[in-house]
Structure formats: C-alpha cells, structure tokens
Image (tube, grey):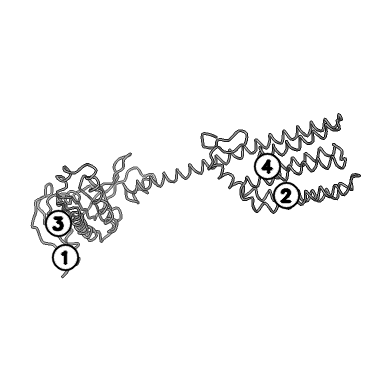
C-alpha cells in the first residue's frame, strides 16, 4: 500500500503516516465502540452464569468460585463504564485487552484453586481467545499479548500435572490460538488496506473535482458559459449568426511609448489593473469580453445571448471606461487616455482552435468598430450612425456629428463623437 500512502508497520500494523493512523482510529472507533460494549455485556453475563453453573456441575469450593466470578463481573461493569472515556480506538483496545487478559488469568486461577480438570480449562481458554479475536476485536498486537499471557499460563498449569491428554489439549489450544492470531493479523491488515484505498480514492476524487472545477473556471475565463456548455456536450464546430450585436474596441492612447520606459513587470501590472477594471465593468453591464490584443480591448453586446438593449449597455460601458482610465492615470501621474470605437450590426460568432480555444467575432460590423476606434478621438466614443440612432434617447449621453468619414474597406459613413452628458 506504500504507493498510495498506506504503508503499514509489519508488527503493529499501524499506518506509518500519523495523519492516516489518526483518521483510521477515529473512523473505526465509532463502530468498534458499540461492539466493545456488547462484548463486555456478554462477558458479564458469562461470568454471572459461571458463578451459578460451575458449583452445580462440579464439586468445588463455591465461595472461591463466587469470589472469582463476581470479581470478573465487577471488572466488566467497570470496563463498561470506562467505554465512555474510550473515544479513540487505542483506549477501546486498552479496555478490551485488560478484560480479556484478566479473563484468561481468571480461568487459570479457577482451574488451579478449585481443581478444575484441564479438559474443561482448555475450552474455557479457547472461549476467552474467541472473545479476543471476534467479539472484542482486539488489534493483532494486543490479541497476541492477551493470548500469549493465558497460553503461557495454561502451559504452566499443564506442566504442573503432566499427562498425555493434557499435553494434547495444550497443543490443540496453542494451535487454535495461533490460527486465530493469524486470522486476526490478516483481517486487520485487510481492513487497513481497504481503509487506505478508500481514503486514496476519496482524495483522488476530491483532487479530480478540484481539477475539474479549475478547468471549468479556466474555460469560462476563455469562453462564454453557454458556449462552454455546448463544447462539453460534444459540439465540435460552433459558428452562430447574430442579426444584431454591438461591438466595441478600446485602445489605450500613449501606452506604447510608455511601455518602452517601464520594466516588463510594471507594464504587465499596469495592463492588469486596467483590464481587471474593464472586466468588472463588462460583467456589470452584462457584456461579453472577446479578447485583448496588447493594450487593445474588445467586447460585444447581444452575443452569445441575443438582446435588444445591448447598444445602450455598450455605450454606458464605454463611458465608464473613460472614467476608470482617467482615475488611474491621475492616480499614477501617467499621460494615458482611451480611444473607443463602437458599431452595431450583424456578426458571426464562433470558436476557433482545438487545443487553445478562442471565441471570436467576424464580419463587417467588427471591421467598422475597429476602424472607428483607430480614427477616434481620445476621451470620446466614436460611434456609427447605426449605434447613435439606438442610444440617442439616453439621458446620460450626448453626441456631435463628425460628418461623413472615409473608412478603409467600408467607404464613407456618418459617425458621431459621444460623451457623457454633463449634469447641470
């Protein structure tokens, strides 16, 4: 079991891993405690029965028998009360060892003091051993100590009155106890191996669940939730047409020359601060981040969840970005501003790649939004007439016409510069 962290001591059968041993003890103690109490009650009943039956069956000193049996019965009562203290397996085993070892010695004392024949002492000793192996479920090392104690005692009794029949009985008792000890060893070893395997499987299951959750989080950082679900469901080609979407491109003006003067880590930290703020605001406005390219940022509204209010949400998002960049630039004393382009229209959205997934947009709408950004003015939203007609009723925004603008690959189109309406 060493390959899964369940290596055992060969003699004591304890786990070499202390944490695993504590876990095993606390787990087994819960079920073992009830069996220990039932075994103690059974032992109590046997000793009380012996107090009555032995004098009836044999011509012995009743007072001595009563004294020994009553003493063992009292010891069992004390042991039963002590089980409340036995909250760990080791404590339970101490109680079991004390009672079983005492029972074996009591049988030997009875045999010597009242003249009990060895033919009766032998099965009595075996009964005590059965209690150790089966009822009290002593661990191998403790069962070995208990059984060894009364087996040696029985050998002394036989040696005091040697007889062929008594020697044969000693051999049979010893053989039975050795077999019982071997079975106890194998059963405890098997139980501990199964426990270690179960813990290993549980640990692997937890690790697998955590890895799956991490994978899910990473996937959701790259893909929209519904797209990730479709990929997990087995779709291999995802490309959807959306009749109406609003695309925004944002670019940090002045960042490229600034980055040449900053250390690589400082550049990364600055971008991380900006884009983390962008991501938070995108989530707040229920927009889908598509990607970042250097210091450029792209989001879309209306994809992959179709909606009607996405132009207003995208414009509000763009205005919030101006506020954020102005705040960070002032805080750091850096000459940074933001240029934004927005256009509304149809797009194709889908997943590209098989190992490194990417959710992307294609179409004229994307190209126009990109051109509007590159021809934009820092601090103003450069939006198409299509988008402006969808948001001009908003109280928060105001715009001025920029007139017809020639866009590469698109020709001339009317555009507007929009800003946040000042509050009187």
User: For the point 21% across and 53% down, which residue is it?
Assistant: 248
Residue lying farthest to the bottom in this orientation? 424
The front one of 81 and 268 is 81
Q: Is residue 10 above or below residue 358?
A: above
**How many other residues sit within 10 Å of disc 1, few (<14), some (14-19) or many (≥20)?**
few
The front one of 139 and 240 is 139
Disc 2 secondary structure class: helix
Residue 40: which numbered mark, if any?
Answer: 2
Answer with left or right where residue 320 lies relative to residue 355. Answer: left
- Tell me which numbered mark, 4 or 1, is placed earlier along the sequence: 4
Alpha carbon distance from label 1 to label 3: 13 Å
**How many other residues sit within 10 Å of disc 4, few (<14), some (14-19) or many (≥20)?**
many
Image location (x, y in percent) of residue 285? 27, 59
Disc 4 secondary structure class: loop
Alpha carbon distance from label 3 to label 4: 81 Å
- Residues under numbered marks 1 and 3 in contact, where contact means CB atoms less than 8 Å apart: no
Image location (x, y in percent) of residue 337? 16, 53
How many numbered tags mark residues here? Answer: 4
Answer with left or right where residue 128 lies relative to residue 275. Answer: right
Answer with left or right where residue 61 lies relative to residue 170. Answer: right
- Residues under numbered marks 2 and 4 in contact, where contact means CB atoms less than 8 Å apart: no
Of badges 2 and 1, nearer the viewer stands 2
Residue 379: which numbered mark, if any?
Answer: 3
**How many other residues sit within 10 Å of disc 2, few (<14), some (14-19) or many (≥20)?**
many
Of badges 4 and 1, nearer the viewer stands 4
The front one of 276 and 302 is 276
Disc 1 secondary structure class: loop
Q: Is residue 25 above or below residue 387?
A: above
- Tell me which numbered mark, 2 or 1, is placed earlier along the sequence: 2
User: For the point 62% across and 50% down, which residue is it?
Assistant: 87
The residue singled out by tag 1 in the image is 421
The residue singled out by tag 4 in the image is 138
């Amino acid at each position: 079991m060493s390959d899964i962290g369940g290596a055992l001591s060969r003699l004591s059968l304890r786990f070499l891993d202390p944490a695993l041993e504590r876990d095993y003890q606390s787990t087994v103690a819960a079920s073992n405690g009830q069996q220990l109490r039932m075994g103690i009650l059974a032992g109590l009943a046997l000793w009380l029965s012996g107090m009555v039956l032995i004098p009836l069956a044999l011509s012995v000193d009743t007072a001595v028998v009563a004294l020994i049996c009553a003493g063992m019965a009292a010891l069992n009562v004390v042991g039963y009360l002590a089980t409340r203290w036995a909250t760990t397996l080791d404590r339970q085993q101490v109680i079991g060892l004390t009672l079983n070892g005492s029972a074996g010695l009591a049988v030997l004392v009875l045999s010597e003091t009242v003249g009990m024949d060895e033919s009766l002492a032998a099965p009595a000793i075996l009964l005590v051993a059965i209690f150790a192996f089966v009822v009290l479920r002593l661990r191998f090392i403790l069962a070995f100590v208990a059984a060894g104690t009364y087996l040696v005692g029985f050998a002394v009794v036989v040696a005091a009155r040697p007889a062929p029949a008594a020697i044969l009985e000693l051999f049979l008792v010893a053989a039975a106890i050795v077999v019982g000890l071997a079975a106890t060893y194998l059963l405890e070893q098997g139980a501990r191996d199964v426990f270690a395997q179960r813990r290993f499987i549980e640990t692997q299951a937890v690790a697998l669940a955590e890895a799956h959750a991490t994978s899910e989080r990473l996937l959701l950082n790259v893909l929209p939730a519904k797209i990730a679900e479709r990929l997990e469901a087995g779709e291999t080609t995802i490309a959807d047409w959306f009749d109406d979407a609003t695309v925004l491109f944002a670019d940090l003006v002045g960042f490229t020359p600034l980055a040449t003067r900053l250390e690589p880590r400082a550049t990364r930290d600055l971008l991380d601060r900006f884009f983390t703020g962008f991501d938070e605001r995108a989530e707040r406005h229920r927009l889908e981040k598509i990607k970042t390219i250097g210091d450029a940022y792209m989001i879309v509204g209306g994809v992959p969840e179709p909606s009607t209010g996405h132009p207003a949400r995208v414009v509000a998002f763009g205005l919030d970005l101006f506020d954020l960049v102005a705040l960070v630039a002032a805080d750091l004393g850096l000459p940074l501003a933001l240029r934004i382009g927005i256009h509304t229209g149809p797009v194709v959205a889908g997943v590209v790649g098989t190992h490194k997934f990417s959710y992307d947009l294609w179409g004229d709408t994307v190209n126009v939004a990109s051109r509007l950004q590159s021809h934009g003015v820092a601090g103003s939203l450069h939006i198409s007439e299509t988008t402006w007609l969808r948001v001009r009723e908003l109280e928060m925004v105001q715009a001025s016409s920029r007139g017809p603008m020639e866009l590469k690959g698109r020709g001339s189109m009317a555009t507007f510069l929009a800003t946040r309406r000042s509050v009187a």
